[in-house]
Amino acid sequence: MAYTGKLGELVKKVEESRASRVGVHYPRMSQEERQDVLEKFHPDYNPNGFRDIKVGVNKGARMPVEMADVFESWSRLRDTKLDLNADPDYDVDVLIIGGGGAGASAALEAYAAGSDVMIATKLRFGDANTMMAQGGIQAADKENDTPAIHYLDVVGGGRFENVPELARALVMDAPLVIKWLEDMGTMFDKKDDGTMVTIHGGGTSRKRMHAARDYTGAEIMRTLRDEVLNKGVTIVEFCAAVEIILDSKGRAAGAVLFNLETEQYLIARAKTVIIATGGSGRLHYRGFPTSNHYGATADGLVIGYRAGAKTIYADSIQYHPTGGAYPPQLLGLLVTEKTRGLGATPLNIKGEQFVYHLETRDVESSAILRECDERGLGVPLPTGITAVWLDSPIIELIHGEGTVEKQLPAMMRQFQRFGVDIRKEPMLIYPTLHYQNGGLLIDENGLTAVENLYVAGEAAGGIHGTNRLMGNSLLDIIVFGRRAGRHAAAVSKEASTPEGLNLDHVEAYHRELEETGAADGRVGPVLLPHYTHR
Amino acid sequence: MSDEIKMVDIFIMGKRYTVPETLTIMDGMEYAGYQLKRGCGCRAGFCGACATVYRIAGDFELKVGLACQTKVEDGMYLAQIPFFPGRKATFDLEEIKPSTAHFAQLYPEVYRCLGCSSCTKVCPQDIDVMQYIAYIQRGDFEKAADISFDCLMCGLCVSRCPANIVHYNAALTARRLYSRYIARPDAFLAERTKAIEAGECDAEIDALVNSNQAKLQEMYNTREIE
Ligand SMILES: Cc1cc2nc3c(=O)[nH]c(=O)nc-3n(C[C@H](O)[C@H](O)[C@H](O)COP(=O)(O)OP(=O)(O)OC[C@H]3O[C@@H](n4cnc5c(N)ncnc54)[C@H](O)[C@@H]3O)c2cc1C
Ligand code: SF4
Ligand code: SF4
Ligand code: FES
C-alpha cells in the first residue's frame, strides 16, 4: 500500500464512490465553459507568466518569463578568445546539432545524398524527448483517410494558426515517413497481413495513430540511431553547441561546441548547420514539473535567435493534464493519455468527478488547476503540493480484470517500482509541462531566415499553430529532419568552404543587451538544469 | 512537512551523504551536490542512461538498477555505470537476411552463451534476456523480437555476461530483421506512398491550403468523425 496516513484515509473515498461511477457519463463542457476555464486557469492565459523580449530580431515578442530570461543572456563566450579561422576541430558539409529523432533523420538523409555529416549532441546520442514518446505517430495511410483529412485535423487542432505550407508538408510526407521507417525495420504494431494497427488520438477524425506498443518513440529512436551508426556518421557526444558561427556573408558556417567533460571549446566548421535540439520543458515555466528529458533547455532556440532566426508562437506551451504527482519520485512523469482513453477519470478530494475525462489537453489541465486552486478540492500531499486522483482501477471494472496489465504495461511498471499498484490503487496526478508548440520559424525545407541555417523538430515552430495534436510531433521531427537533411546536403554540394568565420552577431546582441540592461548576470544557453540540493 | 521525511545515509562511490529517503538514486546524487553530466537522460525509465550498481551495507549481494527508477536506501553504497564498451556490428539491412548464417557473422559470440542466466537476473525491465538469446540462436527472430521489445539498452546485462555477449545490440538487430523481413509490409501504405509521389493527392490538399479560415473552420466543425 503506497498511500498511508492521511492519503490512506482519502483513498477510501475514491473506493467508496467507484462502483457508483461506472457507466455514468459526466457531461462535456460547452464552448463557453471551455473558454472560461482556459482564460482563468490555463498558464498560457496568465499575463504574469509572460513578458516581451527586449532584444534580437523579433524584440517585442511575448515569451514565458523563464524563456525570455535565457534569451536575454550573455554568451558563454563573452570573455573567451577563440580563433575561429585557425584549423577547425571538425570540418564537415552538414553539422547537425542535437541527437534526437530530428537530428538522426537529418543525418540519414544528408548522408544518403553524399554529404560529410556530423552530429554534435549534448548528452548521449538518443538521450532525447524522442526516446520518451509512448503514444504514437500519425499518418493518413488508410483507405478512408487522406492527407487532406489529416490537414484539416492539424489546422483545426492548431486553432488555424499553422503556417499552411508547413502543415501541408507534414501531412503529405506522413505516409512516406511511415514507409521509410517500416523499410528500416521499425517494429510497428501490425495485423498478421501487415496492416498497421491504428487508433484515435485527441482531435483525430480518423484512426491514424500508429504505435509500437507503448514505446513508440523509443522504437523509432533506437532504429534511427542504429542506422546512423551503421552508416558511420561522426557522432560527438557530451558536446553542446553554445553559439552558431556565421561567415563573412552572414551565412551559417558552423558552431562553437563545449565539451561538457573537459570543459574545452571546439570549433566545428560546416557549409550548412541544422539545429535539432528539441524542447524546453526543463526551464520549468511557472514552476511546473515536466515530462521532458534532462537536456530540454531551449539551447537551440537561444543560439539560433542570436544568429538571426525568428521565433514564432514562443508563448504557446502545452501542458499535459496527467503528470505524476506522488510518490515524489514520479513527479512530472507523463501518464499516457491512453489511461483516460480506457476510462480512468480525474477525481477530487471527495472522490467526485469534476470534469469529463477526455476534454482536450488544455481544457483538462485547466480544470485540474481550477479544482486545486480556486475550489480548494485538490488532495494535499506530504510533499507540500496538491494533486487530484486519477482512478485507474475503474478500468478493470469497465473492461475486465487484466486490462491494465495488458494495455498499460509501461505505466504499470513505472508505478509499481515506487509501490503503487495502479490496478488496485488510483494514481495522483497534476498537469506537467510537456511540449513547446512554437519555436524558430522555418520554411518547407527547414530553412530559417539565416542562409544555410536550418531547424528541425521540436525546436522549430509554425507547423502546429498554437496547439499540437498527439502523434504529430514524432511525425514532424522526421518529416522536417529529412527535409532539412536533404536540402542542406544539396546546398552543401554547391558551396565552397566558408570563409571569414565570425561571431559578430553575438557582439551585436551583447551591445543590445548592454543598451537595454536586459541580461543582468545571466549567461546562456542553459545546457544543464541545476537540481543540486533542492 | 519536510521534517516528517526521514533521512538516510548513502555512499556515492564510497563517500557518505545524508539525503531524504523519498528520493531516487538520481535525485539523491543531485541532493548531495552532484551536477550530473553522464548517467542521466530521460529521468523516467526510458533511455537506459543511468545504470547503477549498489550494495546495501551488511548484505553480500551486488544489486543493480536504474538510478532514476530506484529509491535510495539507508546504507546504500553505489556507483553509476554511465558507459559500457559494448560492441555493435555494422550491417546493411538490405544485404542481410533473418538467417542464422548471417547473424553468426555479425554476432558470433551469441552462440557461445553459457546459460548462466546472469543477464536475466540483472535486467531492470524484467526481460528474460537469456531466453531471447536462445531464440536468436535458434533463428526464431520473431520470438526474440517479441520478448526483447522493452529493452532500454542500459547495458547491465552486458556488464555481467561471461560470454561477452552484447545482448541489446543483438536484440535490436533481431527486431530490425523481424520487422523488415518476417512481418509483412503494409500493402495499402505502399499504394498511398506511390499515389503521393505521383502527385495524386495534390489537388485535394491544395484546395484546403488555399481556403480562407472561415471556410476551413466550417469544414472542421462539420467534419465526419470515424
Ligand atoms: C514523455 C513524452 C511523451 C511524448 N509522447 C509523444 C507521442 O506519443 N507522440 C508524439 O508525436 N510526440 C510525443 N512527444 C513529443 C515528441 O516526443 C518530441 O516533441 C520529439 O521527440 C522531439 O524530437 P526532437 O528530435 O526535436 O528533440 P529531442 O528528441 O528532444 O532531441 C534533442 C536532442 O538535442 C540535444 N541537445 C539539446 N541541446 C543541445 C545543445 N546545446 N547542443 C547539442 N545538443 C543539444 C538533446 O540532448 C537531445 O539529444 C512526447 C514527448 C515527451 C517528453
Ligand atoms: S536486456 Fe540488457 S540492456 Fe536491455 S534493459 Fe535488460 S539489462 Fe538493460
Ligand atoms: S549472461 Fe551471457 S552467458 Fe550468461 S545466460 Fe546471459 S547471455 Fe548467456
Ligand atoms: S535516465 Fe533514462 S532510464 Fe534513467
Image (cartoon, rainbow, N blue to C red):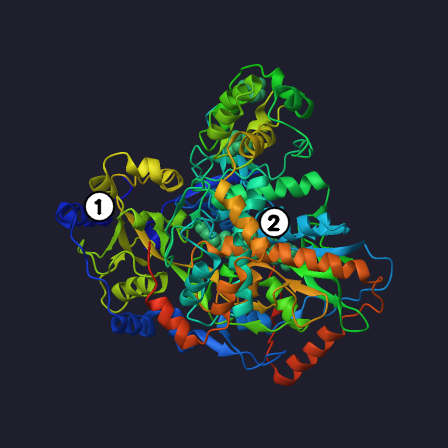
Crowd around label 2: few <14 · some 14–19 · many ≥20 (10 Å): some
Residue at the right extreme, as displayed: A86
Residue A174 coordinates in the image, percent (x, y): 52, 53
Q: Which chain carries label 2?
A: B
Q: Which residue is drawn at 24% across and 49% down?
A: A7
Tell me if A498 is positioned left or right of B109 in this view: right
Tell me if B144 is positioned left or right of A486 in this view: left
Could you say which is closer to the camera, residue A483 or residue A28?
A483
Rendered image: mark on residue A8: 1
Rendered image: mark on residue B174: none
Tell me if A125 is positioned left or right of A196 in this view: right
Q: Mark 1 lies on which chain?
A: A
In the image, what residue type sits under mark 1? Gly
Secondary element at image label 1: helix
Please say if B36 is above or below A494: above
In the image, what residue type sits under mark 2? Lys
Residue A371 coordinates in the image, percent (x, y): 25, 64
Could you say which is closer to the camera, residue A303 or residue A183?
A183
Rendered image: mark on residue B37: 2
Could you say which is closer to the camera, residue A37 or residue B189?
B189
Residue B35 visible in this rendered orientation of the protein:
no
Residue A57 coordinates in the image, percent (x, y): 63, 78
Spatial CA span between label 1 and label 2: 38 Å
Please say if A255 is above or below A392: below
Q: Same chain for marks 1 and 2?
A: no
